[in-house]
Image (tube, helix red, strand yellow):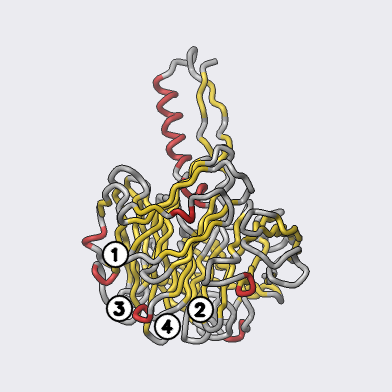
């Protein structure tokens, strides 16, 4: 589900309540008729890009090449302007090195709705374990899930909360560990002042937990959430632990980094009933239930870590999870023990998605691989890839077939695929829903990112008119 769609996932209840109220207050003779909900263009976008304390490369782009958008970008805390992200629309990039923990907040007004997206990447300091990181900048979400966090001295995570609004916001934070729900006395009613950025070390609210799932719920206001996960343990490195899809009985994970060893599936069951999970691997060879992982039990309100067998092979793969109770998940990959990446559970893509290929000095197109598989287990589909340079000039379009039940890996820098190697980003458009992700490998450093729908349209509620 796209962020825009995710932000309105509670609308059906709200619309139902309005309909009920109108039915009570308006007599049959004067009752209004309703026009059904309709998609409208997203013309205003506000994004929070979480930043490392070391150097960060931030890129701002869009799905549709237009030049009439107006952009403002600033560094928070404070309000220092980021001039490099406010020029004419293009693949705009800026290197940022804040004094402490911070976020870059980007506001864009686009009367036509061009599908604004932004990404942040960097290499963490040695005290955090080093490592390459990549995150898609987030808008406000009513709920966010992060699976694979920690609060020990060797595996430690920091929750970043950014209030995107001009009024106070209130959030609740709930933690789940391997032994069940974790008491978090300071997790309820966290107040964020207007435009505040706050970083919460998980060890400060619940120390000693090696594997955690974190739920962040915005009770009031517009809040963007992100999770920075670091380790100086057996697996070393730092990465943004991308937000996982909300708990479901059917879960898909794509963008799992290559490497036969060091892959850990992290299952989070926040419900009151235990879950029995069947794990299938979707590779270039097809789909198969993993031996010994066809009936994994996850206790109610807990997190379970499962080492994935080396028999999966070293190639990038996707996972499908079938569960008896709603859960969410991620995969942590540490192929060399020098760095690790997270692949988060995600909703299928239904519309265009932006794939970053160049982020400053952090990585380029040759470091990127795109993984995609049909969301349907029985039907093949295709994806269209259109590449652009930094000035939004199209470098050509190609189509890739995705066989049913298989994960297809695409090298965007392959010779002859596009008309130039000056690749800035790709717009990936599926002909039918797909599950997709990207990985980045630069030497021994790795990171990954689920691909999400770009915010082109949002579903508006019903409109009543007298008739």
Q: Which mark is residue 152?
A: 3
- Note whether 109 is above or below 6 in the view shown: above
The local crowd at label 1, few if under 14, some if 14 to 19, many if 20 or more residues have their Cα within 10 Å, is few
Residue 417 location in percent, x, y? Answer: 75, 67
Identify residue for label 1: 200
Give residue 211's mark.
none
Label 4: few (<14), some (14–19) or many (≥20) C-alpha neighbours in 10 Å:
many
**Dot 4 and dot 3 residues touching (CB under 8 Å):** no
- Camera-side residue: 310 or 398? 398
Q: Percent position (x, y) of residue 124?
A: 41, 75
Point 61% across, 51% down: residue:
63
Can you say which quadrant of the picture contains the C terminus? top right
Q: Is residue 395 left or right of residue 363?
A: right
Q: CA distance from mark 1 to mark 4?
A: 21 Å
Q: Nearer the viewer, mark 1 or mark 2?
A: 1
Q: CA distance from mark 1 to mark 3?
A: 14 Å
Q: Which residue is mark 2?
A: 333
Q: Is the residue marked by circle 3 packed among few (<14), some (14-19), or many (20+) residues within 10 Å?
A: some
Considering only order in the chain, which callout, 3 or 4, is on the residue closer to the N terminus? 3
In what element is the residue under mark 1? Answer: strand
The disc, 4 or 2, on the residue closer to the chain's N-terminal end is 4
Residue 236 got which mark?
4
């Amino acid at each position: 589900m796209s962020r825009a769609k995710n932000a309105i996932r509670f609308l059906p209840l709200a619309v139902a309540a309005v309909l009920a109220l109108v039915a009570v207050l308006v007599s049959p003779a004067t009752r209004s008729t309703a026009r059904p909900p309709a998609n409208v263009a997203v013309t205003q976008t506000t994004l929070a890009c979480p930043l490392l304390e070391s150097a960060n490369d931030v890129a701002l782009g869009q799905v549709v090449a237009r030049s009439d958008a107006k952009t403002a970008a600033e560094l928070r805390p404070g309000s220092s302007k980021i001039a490099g992200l406010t020029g004419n629309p293009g693949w705009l990039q800026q290197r940022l090195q804040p004094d402490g923990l911070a976020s870059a907040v980007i506001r864009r007004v686009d009367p036509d709705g061009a599908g604004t997206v932004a990404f942040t990447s960097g290499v963490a300091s040695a005290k955090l374990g080093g490592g390459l990181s990549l995150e898609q900048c987030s808008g406000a979400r009513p709920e966010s899930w992060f699976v694979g966090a920690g609060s020990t001295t060797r595996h430690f995570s920091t929750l970043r909360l950014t209030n995107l609004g001009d009024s106070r916001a209130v959030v609740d934070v709930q933690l789940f560990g391997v032994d069940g729900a974790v008491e978090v006395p300071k997790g309820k009613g966290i107040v964020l002042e207007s435009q505040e950025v706050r970083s919460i070390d998980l060890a400060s609210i619940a120390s000693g937990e090696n594997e955690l799932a974190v739920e962040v719920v915005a009770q009031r206001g517009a809040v963007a959430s992100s999770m920075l996960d670091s380790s100086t343990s057996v697996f070393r490195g730092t990465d943004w632990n991308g937000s996982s899809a909300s708990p479901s009985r059917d879960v898909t994970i794509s963008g799992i980094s290559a490497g036969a060893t060091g892959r850990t599936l992290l299952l989070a069951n926040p419900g009151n009933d235990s879950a029995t999970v069947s794990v299938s691997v979707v590779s270039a060879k097809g789909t198969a239930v993993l031996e010994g992982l066809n009936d994994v039990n996850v206790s109610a309100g807990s997190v379970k870590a499962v080492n994935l067998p080396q028999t999966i092979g070293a190639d990038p793969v996707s996972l499908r999870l079938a569960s008896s109770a709603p859960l969410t998940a991620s995969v942590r990959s540490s192929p060399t023990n020098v760095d690790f990446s997270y692949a988060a559970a995600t909703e299928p893509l239904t519309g265009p998605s932006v794939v970053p290929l160049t982020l400053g000095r952090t990585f380029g197109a040759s470091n990127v691989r795109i993984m995609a598989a049909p969301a349907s287990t029985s039907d093949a589909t295709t994806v269209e890839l259109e590449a652009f340079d930094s000035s939004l000039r199209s470098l050509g379009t190609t189509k890739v077939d995705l066989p049913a039940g298989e994960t297809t890996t695409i090298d965007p820098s392959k010779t002859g695929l596009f008309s130039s190697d000056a690749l800035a980003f790709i717009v990936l458009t599926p002909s039918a829903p797909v599950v997709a992700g990207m990985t980045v490998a630069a030497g021994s450093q790795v990171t990954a990112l689920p691909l999400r729908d770009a915010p082109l349209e949002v579903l508006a509620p019903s409109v009543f008119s007298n008739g």
